[in-house]
Amino acid sequence: MAVNFKENEGIVEDILSVYSEKAKKNRKEHIGINSKETCGSCVAKSNVKSLPGVMTPRGCAYAGSKGVVWGPVKDVINISHGPIGCGMYSWGTRRNLANGEPGIENFMPFQFTTDFKERDIVFGGDKKLEQAIKELHELFPSAKGIIIDSECPIGLIGDDIEAVAKKMTDEIKIPVIPVRCEGFRGVSQSLGHHIANDTIRDFVVGTGEIDESKKTPYDVAILGDYNIGGDVWSSMKIFKEMGLNVVAHWSGDGSIEEMKITHGVNYNLLHCYRSMNYIARHFEEKFGIPWIEYNFFGPTKIKESIRSIAKLFDGNIQEKSEGVIKAYEPKMQEVIDKYRPRLEGKKVMILVGGLRPRHIVGAYEDLGMKVVSAAYEFAHTDDYERTTKELEDGTIIADDMNEYEFVELANRLKPDLVASGIKEKYVFQKMGIPFRQMHSWDYSGPYHGYDGFEIFARDMDLAVNSPSWKLVKPRWKK
Amino acid sequence: MEKEEVKKIKDWMNTEEYKEKNFNRKAITINPERACQPLGAVLCAAGFEDTMPFVHGSHGCVAYYRNNLSRHFREPIAGVCTSLTEDGAVFGGQANGFEGFKNATALYKPKMFAISTTCMSEIIGDDLGSIVGNAREKGYLSEDISAPYANTPSFAGSHLEGYDSMLNAIIETLGKKRDAAKADIINIIPGFDTTVGNINEVKRILKIFGINYLVLADYSNTLDSPLNGEYKLYPDGATKLEDVKNCVNNKAAIAMQKYATKKTAAMLSEKFGQDVRVVKSPIGINYTDEFLMTLSELSGKEVPQEIEDERGRAIDSMTDAQQYIHGKKFAIFGDPDMLIGLTSYLLEMGGIPKYVLCSNGTEDFKKEIEDLFAAYSESGAEVYIDKDLWHLRSLLMTGPVDMLLGPSHGKFAAREANIPHIRVGYPIFDRVNIHRYPLYGYSGVINLTTWIVNKFLDVLDDTSDDAHFELMR
């Protein structure tokens, strides 16, 4: 199915025609047509400010830190430091599953906030923060750390959370970590990831003692898997079967205790490049730990990933890894045989964060589906470099695609499935287009690993082929 | 951690000693049931014709409001913002405001921008009035587009005040006083009510009464729009701007929630001399009766027989089921007006609302609940304002109740206390369609009775041994 370049260029041109000249010029640079030959990274301009006044899909730095990187660490308390809203809206909404007794080993089901009022804005909130930390330590003595996730006001009113954190670390003898992830910093969640990575680097990495007697040549850490719907667990299963020893998983179902000893591993395995490449690079520079990207969506990519990871190790691991691939092949073939005939040729439009628009392409292709447009919320140039090779030439690639553009593009590309977030879900469903939330797995999952693919395939089928979509038009209007 | 150690801490967390420590905290809030002002402003805006919520702040804020409301209603929620970043903090947000108006006008062609603020724009001290004025002067904002604005700082009040301030601004900005006689129309102000079934129930009652009405803000259709293959950015059925213009000349207004309409109610009464009645949210028989009597008084019409028959059916449903509620203890939490209604309903059923907890309640609210307890000679009931769900957990673990009523966030405490949890209020993220069923009116009485009693009966069936697993209940 060859894509007509000219046609897609025309579509983009047409969609942008409604903008003012200035806005049009801006947005034009963010939407490209894929061409492997000419340019990878320059397909779309990225990581710059959004246009004001458009429904951008983007969130903020706080969302990137508290919501993504720090939030899933289960044995620490994340304080949403500032007014009530941010903590409220990010409470339990990313589906970072975690084992452990709530309130003792696992703080996932909680929303902690200093709940700023007017007087805190006027007089500063440092004293309140200090008191809050003391109270938390008293009420939750088993917490292994306290993370101060700053909301907008903190940076604007000039609070010194670093001083409070330092003082409290000395006093309560667990790490108290100040994170300057105020929502106005940067242009999207992405800077929040980076800021959170930097605080992990500065306050956590290397602080644990490595028990040399327990070290094996197969020690690895998973970076950038947030255990959405249990992704970490289905991935761990594979690594275990390959013979690897997963010492830490960052940060889904993760623990600060594991993060402290991650510098003892032999390799870092990186799933979400966008949100954790920073810390992977740090481990490499400071501790000489190599890192490798992998992709656990769909059997084709899983197979490739298992092989490239196995290459880092000895023959024993390589042999076991081939065994793993072989062992799952019949099951995967069964899944494909069941769903592919129902999904073959169906067109998908994707708009997600900074990884999945390229990472899930293979899984859709395993099911015979075709990605007709891929858009990111907050990717950078290096993400686009990695994206162009995953997609057919002619595919529309877009950066920070807003709701107007997304809807207009769908009107023209006529997808059978849209894969994006909660803000977009009901827009497309009103249009009668099947939809799956691809941030939260739409309350399903896991989607990673072999076990995940079976669920992914089932979910795409139940969305695309639900009989309910055929009822949208009344019989008297057909 | 070692299992024994975990158990030791867990046991301690369930003690009176822990409860005392927990209630002594001053600085940290744990699991509050309260959102921030701009969320209320965005909800309010969704009730007006061709209106785009316009949030002056960083785009993280508006993304959160849209997410949050979408998860509850399972509907698209529109909203734009000025995408403030660091330079906005230094230079102010006017330039972003200008560009925002221009872009949003080009893409979304609204008839009105409902402008609200966030922490950031409040702290940097941006003046919405001058931004709007300058934008008009310089041509970024067309004169054809209304642009009411409200200050909705997240560090004061809650979603209730945000809703109220936005509604107040919209009516005050658009309303045009006429000297002619008042129109024979009653304004209905629902308040921050995310149970669209409530608004529909009120409208149904008014239709049966034969009363002309205008709902301000009416998102009962826009946030419950038909799926018919067409996406409408501004779905049909919202309050028309022309009607808002005239609403100040209508003969009366009824505010259905006292604590989410204070500013608006005062403005209509003081500035426009409207006969404003603030009723108790009509949950349960007594408050529904009061609401109907208010309608009767304002319209000069008798309560229709059709509605009186509905009342009889609701009473019938209560008496059929009251044995399963009488003497049962409940914990309830959520927004204040709903809690007053639920307390009244439970007392009518012989239930005991032992804990009434409100993260955004005031002393006035507390007094209202205590007066209700007193009216039913119910001692031993406790009302907590400015408390959160971690406080509630301590209450449930030290002094158990039989059921929890409130939004989805209560599920963690209910699970620990091993009690059933009926979802009411905002937000409901983990059950479908609940918000379509009214709590209001006699229909609401039947809904509440059905949910509560059948839940108790499900638990009874799920937990009884073979001998007691009976056919009849």
Image (spheres, coloured by chain):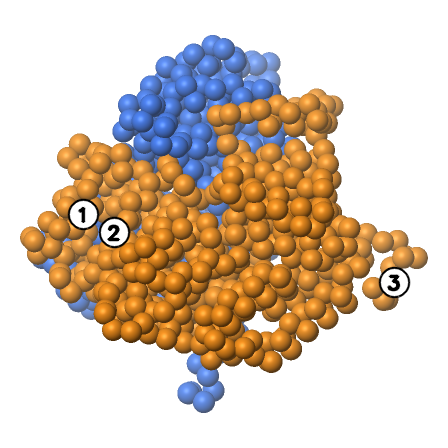
Q: Position of residue B229 (x, y in %)?
A: 39, 74
What color is chain A drawn in?
blue
Q: Position of residue B75 (x, y in %)?
A: 43, 62
- Residue that sits furthest to the top in the current view: A170
Q: Nearer the viewer, mark 2 or mark 3?
A: 2
Residue B362 in view here: yes
- Between the residue at mark 2 and the residue at mark 3, the CA separation in whole angstroms equals 60 Å
- Between the residue at mark 1 and the residue at mark 3, the CA separation in whole angstroms equals 67 Å
Q: State the residue at coordinates (50%, 66%).
A: B294
* For residue B186, above or below residue A141: below
- Between the residue at mark 1 and the residue at mark 2, the CA separation in whole angstroms equals 8 Å
| Disc on res. B470 | 3
Foreground residue among A117 and B408 = A117
Q: Nearer the viewer, mark 1 or mark 3?
A: 1
Question: Which chain is tinted orange?
Answer: B
10 Å crowding of disc 3: few (<14), some (14-19), many (20+): few
10 Å crowding of disc 2: few (<14), some (14-19), many (20+): many
Mark 1 lies on residue: B129
Q: State the residue at coordinates (64%, 25%).
A: B20
